[in-house]
Structure formats: C-alpha cells, structure tokens
Amino acid sequence: MEVTRLAPGTLIVDDSAPHCLNGPEALARFTEKQDILCTEGGFIRSNLPMPRIAHIPPSIAAGLPTELPQLFLSFLTPHDITSCILSALLSAQKPDLTPTIGPIAPAAARQHWAALAELGFSAAAVNYEGTPLSAEGIAAFRKRFGKSEIPSAPFAAVA
C-alpha cells in the first residue's frame, strides 16, 4: 500500500513479510506529520536472551538474495522472537492451550498471554523495521487520534 494513500489517524500493525508499506516512507510520515502510526506485529520479548541458529539448505541457498538473512535478523534483538515460532512450543508445553487457526476468541488470547507472562515474556518494543518509534511521536499520535480513555487489558501492549 502507498503510504501517501493512508488517511490521517491510520494505525497499522504490520505482521506481513514483506511488509505492506514502504518502511522508510511510513517512518518519515510518522516522524514528520505524526498522523499515522505503524508498528510490527507478531513479536514478543523474552526476559532472557535467546540464541539464534539459522540454516539455509544448500539446495535453495543459491536462489536466495545474499542479503536475505541480514534483512531478517537485522531488526531482531536477542530478546525478541516471532510469536508464530513460539506458538507451537507453547501449545506443546501447555496442553490446556490448544493450537488455533484463524480468528481467536479474546478469552483464548488472554489465556495464551497469561501463559507467556508466566514464562517471562512481554510485549516487544514498539518499532517498525527495527526502528524504534519515539515515545513523543506515539504520544502525539494518541493525543490527536486516540480515545480519551484507553481500556486496560492484560494482553494490551501500550507504550
């Protein structure tokens, strides 16, 4: 989607790969106009660093851009992990957390979030393509376009 076509007040939580927006353009608009807010979706943060092992089979490595591993890993800290990777492990360790496909009921989301919190996970830092979003910019967007009251929820990540 073209960043210029976004209406003021648009909030995008981007969990696509590749992203649905031009990152530099979206970040520039957020910084300059503070009339859109875009952030990564699908990341959670561990209280402990996690080692990374990446393997690309030789049979497909030749067909991939050489910068691909760096592009993917450049915005991950040792504490961040995509929730889709962790999801299967969580369901395997906690039988009461059944795997889900498609939309999830709020009660089930809260149950999964509580299990993650018990294991030391929290919301990832608010960023887009590895660039942290400034607290001032988020506050300006919230003041201009947000509701006067923000409902509290045990699984909400509010910066």
Image (cartoon, rainbow, N blue to C red):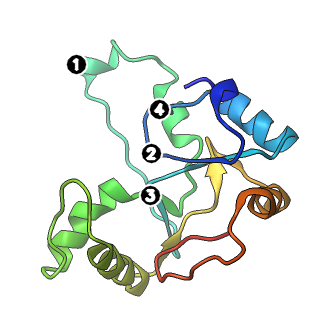
Say if 62 sits above or below 83 in the image.
Answer: above
Mark positioned earlier in the residue sequence (2 or 1): 2
Q: Nearer the viewer, mark 2 or mark 1?
A: 2
Within-10-Å neighbours for mark 2: few <14, some 14–19, many 20+: some
Mark positioned earlier in the residue sequence (3 or 2): 2
Say if 2 sits above or below 113 in the image.
Answer: above
- C-alpha span from label 1 to label 3: 26 Å
- C-alpha span from label 2 to label 1: 28 Å
Label 1: which secondary element: helix
Q: Amino acid at mark 1?
A: Ser
* Contact? badges 3 and 2 (CB < 8 Å): no
Q: Which residue is mark 2?
A: 15
Q: Which residue is mark 3?
A: 81
Mark positioned earlier in the residue sequence (4 or 3): 4
Q: Which residue is mark 4?
A: 69
Q: How many marks?
A: 4
Q: Nearer the viewer, mark 4 or mark 1?
A: 4
Q: Quadrant of the C terminus?
A: bottom right
Label 3: which secondary element: strand
Label 2: which secondary element: loop
Q: Residue at x 16, y 65 (%)?
A: 99
Within-10-Å neighbours for mark 1: few <14, some 14–19, many 20+: few
Q: Amino acid at mark 4?
A: Pro
Mark positioned earlier in the residue sequence (1 or 3): 1
Q: Residue at x 33, y 73 (%)?
A: 106
Q: Residue 3 placed where, x, y %?
A: 66, 28
Q: Amino acid at mark 2?
A: Asp
- C-alpha span from label 4 to label 2: 18 Å
* Contact? badges 4 and 2 (CB < 8 Å): no
